[in-house]
Image (cartoon, rainbow, N blue to C red):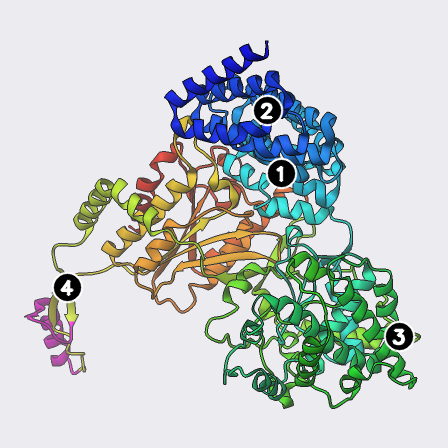
Amino acid sequence: MTSSKQQAINEQLTQLRDSSLVAHRELEQVLPAIRPHGDEAALAWVLACRKLHDYDREAGRAFVRGSLEAERISETVVPWTEQALQFARWRGAWRALEGFMNNLPRAYGSLGHAGQRRWAEIGFVWCGRQVDSGCAYFATPVVDLSGRQGITGIEQLTLPAEELFESRKLLLATYLGGAIRVRNLLGAQAILPWALRGADILQAARARGEAYFRLESEESLALLLDQLPGFRLVERNRLLAMLLDVWYGQCFDMKEGSWSPEKGRPFVETDGRSIYFPAIMPNRDEAVLSLLHTAGHMRFGTFDRLAMKALFRQAGVEFPESGPVSWAPLYARYGDDALRFQLIFDLCEDLRVDYRIQHLVPNYLQRMLATARSGARHAETGVYYTLAVKSVEQALAASRNDGVRDERFAPLLQTSATVADAWRLASAIYAQDGLPPVTDLEAFHAAYLPGRAPNTTRLAHPQQQDQQQQQTQSGAEGEQQPQQNGEDQDESAQNAESGDQRDGGKRQEIAGFGDTSGATTRAAGRSEEQRANTGSSDKGVPYPEWDYRESRYKRNWSWVQEKKLAESNITETNRLMNQYSAALKRLKKAIQAQKPTRLAPQLRQLDGEDMDINAVVTYVVEKKAGRSPKPAIYRRREQRQREIAVTLLADMSTSIMQHLPEGGGRLVDRVRAGVLLFAESMEEVGDPYSIAGFCSKYRDNVSYYTIKDFEQPLSQDVRSQIGGMSGRLATRMGAAIRHATACFDGIESRRRLLLILSDGRPEDYDDGGDRRYLHEDTRMAVKEAVAKGVHPFCITVDTMANQYLPQIFGRGHYLVLDQINSLPNKLPEIYFRLRR
């Protein structure tokens, strides 16, 4: 019996060698590890190699290459060999098999034999439903699937997926990556509500839904932030700003940072000019500690220009004479050990600053110490965390005049100490102490005490010594500090302002420390008065908003930020130009036909090439009558141009990313083409024009993208931005119309036209579901524009627009396009009709 099986193995090897020498060679390298399990197991394995190779060469290669490690971990052969043969049931499943073999050792190691069988069974079910979903399942690392909870963690992901597949036909490949992150952040109970919302969005607009499930859209990130447990700084930013005002006696420029849940531990950071806070911190104590600590860095000289110069001189790095300063060159000399040195330096500088804060904020160090002692220590960087706790204990003892037991830290507890002293001490500790290396970013973040943060991740804005007490006032006083070398522009576009959080006029107690915590009504009133007089330039331009429910304007209610469109795509622009070249040629020909070819006579002129007979007779008669007529007796011929200026305002909300029916592409492609043909046509006409787009997320974050200004030429950069237009967020149309109307100020033109291109009704995330609210505000914005001599006209592809546009724009001032595909051609033609 044994010899017959051995003969069968040899026959299979011979046939495989005739088929592929490479596959035969790889199989022979692995076969010695399989033979100890017996001839029967070896034969089954060789037959599986042959069948999978015949099914797909890539599948056979993946099986052979993964077998060695699978055998070593599982100490079996037949069970996973039979499982691998299952993949031959489905066409194109070799990628799923490749993922299965790659993850097989970890499945046995972390789930056990029973758990591995269940893991494989779940994957086979999804392969049967859709191969791409099976590939996504088996390609995902088992540890990520299980969330370190064994097979229970995997079922937490797949059970909601099965329900959604049955009810919504939602595929696992679409859902899986985002679901893992949602479970890790919010728990298994949050997966199904999150996925149901995503399925609704996916049904309405595929691109928008896919971005939601990848956690790349504003909607999905907002949902995560809404569900995350913790202390929400966004909702309490006024209160926290007042707290800083109380303890430090000055106002700080506070901005919401770009932190999102997948970035790990949230920190409050500063660049020496502004404080950037995350939306959520783990708890109230850490949030307050973080703000006080970060403001302390700004108050006590971390960014003092002279001290920073001394630090750079010690490190042997040239200090730039102007503009923002990068900390990266300081750490470059440490190579792979840079994270280790940064931890030591931050520990020293944080200690210096915290000791100074203690003299202003009673019980500050006590509260930091209590919070730190209750924190968890990371296995890799726990020694740094422990050292930081000991340093705080040293500072607390020094503040009580109990002496300093660790003399290393004594120089930092002097009022004359600077950031350069912290660097000097950090260099000494780095050279002498055997602190372990740090290679993992998660471990690096875990080494910071609650309330502290990496100090040198942002570009620094050095401050002069005489500015040190005043430099944080600039944000509160509304002074727009100049950008150096264009830095921070991209970040300003990403970091949406948190907004003015209303408290309904109720007074709130200010959280603080010690017996003197809190603030008097007088201090709170002073802080409010300062903020009321700022103009809030960082938030953009304020506009009123009409509330029909109260029949009044809300003053400074919506805020518009002008931005440059970051996306550009010259390839898409060139494609559209080629696609619509015939249409553009027809438009230009029609424009040439509209241009006046005959010279219009200008009568009664003071000079000209001919006499105006009627004017001459009148002049002679009046002269004879003893009057003094003006000698306007000439006539000349010239082309008479129309005086009109136009702004094309495009709705750039998420809905323009929707796919058109019957494989018609995407709506955004028609929008780009229409705007591009409009621009090229306007160049032929010669009328002054501008192009802008808008979107919004809440009343205090309306983005206005100026793609082309009136005085700006139609350059390649402008064309490239048009090709890069895409959808994002919502449609607060009233604020955008008010800002576009304001942009006409200073434009010398007899007629001013605002052409609005939209695909839906005015809506935003904070309208409370009351559609009429923003409809009425947009109607009032249109009336305001007309009163200022600007005439809005709306073009929409929303087939339901006849239900609301007559009330907003009035009859005759809007057009509903029944055929979306006609938009590129119709947009310029509509303008030509309106300009007559």
Confirm whether residue 810 shows in the render: yes
Q: Position of residue 688 (x, y in %)?
A: 31, 61
Tell me the residue at 58%/20% (across/down): 42
Tell me the residue at 71%/48% (across/down): 226
Q: Position of residue 223 (x, y in %)?
A: 67, 45
- Find disc 4 in the rendering and name its residue: 638
Mark 3 to mark 4: distance in Å? 83 Å
In what quadrant of the picture does the N terminus appear? Answer: top right
Furthest toward the front, the residue is 3
Residue nearest the viewer, comparing 395 with 626 = 395
Q: Which mark is residue 128?
A: none
- Find disc 1 in the rendering and name its residue: 141
- Find disc 3 in the rendering and name its residue: 363
Q: Quadrant of residue 642?
A: bottom left
Name the kind of residue labelled 2 in the image: Arg
Q: Secondary structure at mark 2?
A: helix
Q: Are marks 2 and 4 in contact (CB under 8 Å)?
A: no
Mark 1 to mark 4: distance in Å? 76 Å
Q: Is residue 60 magenta?
A: no
Name the kind of residue labelled 3 in the image: Asn
Q: Position of residue 590 (x, y in %)?
A: 20, 45
Q: Secondary structure at mark 1?
A: loop
Q: Answer with mark 1 or mark 3, whichever residue precedes in sequence.
A: 1
State the extent of the magenta-drawn residues as a range.
605-626
Q: Answer with mark 3 or mark 2, whichever residue precedes in sequence.
A: 2
